[in-house]
Every structure is written in structure tokens, then in C-alpha cells.
């Protein structure tokens, strides 16, 4: 049974930092490209960042480029998102997703497994 579990969310002041973690079990982690998505109240879920299986290739949405860093540790089956210089508009539920085969940074609907999310709230 595949499980994807996010952690590390919380309340932080604008300008602060958080590091999200995502641990996957029940799958061969390095067979999967991984992604971070977020969804704010009343808005669609949006892609934040992706990373390929080896961790060499990464993608960032323009809104987070230069502030967020995605990484993975395949030995620990864990994905990370380091978030710096946080802004109130970064407030959302953050989700981790795993994608097997095909494109390493696909659209939302192509991901195979999702976590339940971790809440990030940035106060002004």
C-alpha cells in the first residue's frame, strides 16, 4: 500500500522560512518523479515545483523561483521543499505527489499518488 505523507507546515511571518518534507512508502521511490503543489481557499491546485527521479532536473513556478528549492534524498524516500522569503500569498495547503514514468514534470492529473497535504500560513 502506497503512502505519501507531508510534514513541516505551520504558521510563519512574512519573510520567514519553512522546510516541507514528504515521505513515500510502499513504492520504489527513485522510480518516481516528484512534485509539490499548493491550493489556496477558493483557488485551483497549482504546480509549485517538480524534480526528476535522480534529482538533477528541477522546475519552479515563476511565483516561487529564487525563493523555493526542491530536493530529494532517494536513500531516505524523502522529498523536500525549502521555502525562504515567504509571502502571505504563499499561504495554502501544500501537497506532495508522485509520478511514475513519462514526463518528469507533468500536469496535475498525471500524478499517480498524492499526500493529504500540510498547511502553510504566512502572516503579514
Image (tube, rainbow, N blue to C red):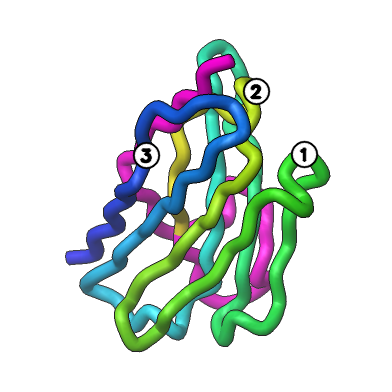
* Numbered disc 2: secondary structure: helix
In the image, farthest residue toward the top: 42
User: Residue 115 at x, y = what percent?
Assistant: 34, 48
User: Residue 116 at x, y = what percent?
Assistant: 31, 41
**Badge 1: few (under 14), some or many (20 or more) residues near its Cα, within 10 Å?**
few
- Determine whether label 2 and label 3 are within 8 Å by CB: no
Identify the mark nearer the N-term, 2 or 3: 3
Residue at mark 2? 89
Magenta part of the protein: which range?
98-124
Residue at mark 1? 63
The one nearer the camera, 74 or 19, is 19
Could you say which quadrant of the image residue 90 lies in?
Answer: top right
Magenta span has 119?
A: yes
Residue at mark 3? 9
In the image, farthest residue toward the right: 62
The one nearer the camera, 101 or 40, is 40
Q: Residue, x 43% and y 66% (percent of image)? A: 79
Amino acid at each position: 500500500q502506497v503512502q505519501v505523507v507531508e510534514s513541516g507546515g505551520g504558521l510563519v511571518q512574512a519573510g520567514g522560512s519553512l522546510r516541507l518534507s514528504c515521505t513515500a512508502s510502499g513504492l520504489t521511490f527513485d522510480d518516481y518523479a516528484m512534485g509539490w503543489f499548493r491550493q489556496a481557499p477558493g483557488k485551483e491546485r497549482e504546480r509549485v515545483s517538480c524534480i526528476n527521479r535522480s534529482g538533477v532536473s528541477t522546475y519552479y513556478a515563476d511565483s516561487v523561483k529564487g525563493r523555493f528549492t526542491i530536493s530529494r534524498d532517494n536513500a531516505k524516500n524523502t522529498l523536500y521543499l525549502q521555502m525562504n522569503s515567504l509571502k502571505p500569498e504563499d499561504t495554502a495547503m501544500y501537497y506532495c505527489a508522485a509520478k511514475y514514468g513519462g514526463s518528469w514534470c507533468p500536469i496535475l492529473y498525471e500524478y499517480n499518488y498524492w499526500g493529504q497535504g500540510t498547511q502553510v500560513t504566512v502572516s503579514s
